[in-house]
C-alpha cells in the first residue's frame, strides 16, 4: 500500500536540493496558488452580461449572471419572454446555481492538492479547473437552447415567433427584440485560472519529472 501511495504522490524533493534550487520547485506551487485564488475570487464577479432592447423599453433591459444568482431586470425580461412562451429565467440551471460555489471550492482544493503531488496523477486533480470555463459556456448554451426551442404554444405571441436558439455571446435577437451578450469579469478570472494551471503544469513537469525518472532508475 505504501508503494502505491508513494507512486501516486510522487518523489519528495531532497532537502539539500530544495535549498539549492528552491525557486525551481516553488514556481509551480506559486502558479497554482495564484490560479486557485483567481478562481475563488471569480465567485464575487459577474460571469455573463446581457442587454435586451425592446420597443417598450427604450433604455434597454439588463441581465447579469453570477455563478450562483441572477441580477438586473429579471422580472421585466421574464414578462417579455412570457409573451413568446419562454419559461422564467429562474428555472434555468437551478441545480448549477445552487451547487456552483461548492463546486468552485472543490476545484480550489483540487488545484491545491495538485501542487503537493509530484507525479503525473496531479493533472487529474486539475482537469475540473482547466475545463470549467468551457463547461460554463456549454451549460449556458444548453439552457438557452432548451428555453428557446421549447416555447409554450399557448403563449400570446406564439403564432408570430418560431422556436429559436438565443445567441450566447455577441449580437442576436428575435422579432422586435435585440440582445447583446458578453462575458463578465468572473468568467475571465476563471479563464485566467485555467491558463495558469496549464502553465503551472509545464513548470511542475520540468521540476518533478527528473526526480521521478531518477527514482525509477534507482529501483
Image (spheres, grey):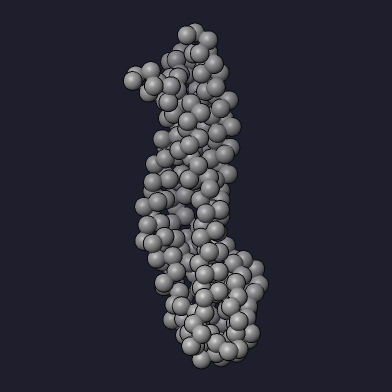
Would you place residue 2 above or below residue 134 in this image? above
Would you place residue 175 above or below residue 170 in this image? below
Residue furthest right as drawn: 171
Residue furthest left as drawn: 1
Would you place residue 53 above or below residue 11 in this image? below
Does any portion of residue 57 appear in the rendered image?
no
Does any portion of residue 122 appear in the rendered image?
yes
The image position of residue 177, as x and y in percent, is 61, 83
Q: Who is closer to the viewer here, 71 or 93?
A: 93
Q: Who is closer to the viewer here, 130 or 46?
A: 130
The image position of residue 5, as x and y in percent, is 37, 23
Residue furthest top as drawn: 218
The image position of residue 63, as x and y in percent, is 50, 73
Q: Who is closer to the viewer here, 195 or 142?
A: 142
Left or right of 85, for residue 168? right
The image position of residue 45, as x and y in percent, is 47, 60
Residue furthest front as drawn: 153
Which residue sits at x=34%, y=19%?
A: 2
Q: Who is closer to the viewer here, 19 or 36?
A: 36
Which residue sits at x=56%, y=27%?
A: 205
Would you place residue 132 above or below residue 208 in this image? below
Which residue sits at x=55%, y=74%?
A: 149
Res 171 quadrant in image: bottom right
Which residue sits at x=60%, y=72%?
A: 165
Q: Quadrant of the N terminus?
A: top left
Total numbered labels: 0
Left or right of 49, for residue 114? left
Amino acid at each position: 500500500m505504501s508503494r502505491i501511495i508513494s507512486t501516486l504522490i510522487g518523489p519528495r524533493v531532497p532537502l539539500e536540493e530544495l535549498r539549492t534550487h528552491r525557486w525551481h520547485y516553488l514556481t509551480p506551487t506559486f502558479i497554482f496558488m495564484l490560479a486557485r485564488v483567481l478562481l475563488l475570487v471569480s465567485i464575487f464577479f459577474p460571469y455573463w452580461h446581457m442587454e435586451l432592447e425592446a420597443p417598450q423599453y427604450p433604455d434597454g433591459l439588463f441581465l447579469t449572471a453570477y455563478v450562483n444568482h441572477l441580477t438586473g431586470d429579471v422580472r421585466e425580461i421574464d414578462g417579455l419572454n412570457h409573451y413568446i412562451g419562454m419559461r422564467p429565467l429562474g428555472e434555468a440551471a437551478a441545480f448549477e446555481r445552487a451547487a456552483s460555489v461548492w463546486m468552485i471550492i472543490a476545484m480550489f482544493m483540487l488545484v491545491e492538492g495538485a501542487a503537493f503531488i509530484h507525479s503525473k496523477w496531479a493533472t487529474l486533480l486539475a482537469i475540473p479547473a482547466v475545463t470549467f470555463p468551457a463547461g460554463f459556456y456549454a451549460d449556458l448554451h444548453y439552457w438557452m437552447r432548451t428555453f428557446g426551442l421549447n416555447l409554450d404554444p399557448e403563449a400570446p405571441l406564439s403564432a408570430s415567433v418560431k422556436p429559436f436558439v438565443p445567441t450566447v455571446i455577441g449580437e442576436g435577437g428575435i422579432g422586435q427584440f435585440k440582445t447583446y451578450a458578453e462575458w463578465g469579469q468572473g468568467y475571465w478570472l476563471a479563464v485566467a485560472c485555467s491558463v495558469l494551471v496549464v502553465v503551472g503544469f509545464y513548470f511542475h513537469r520540468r521540476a518533478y519529472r527528473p526526480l521521478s525518472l531518477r527514482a525509477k532508475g534507482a529501483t
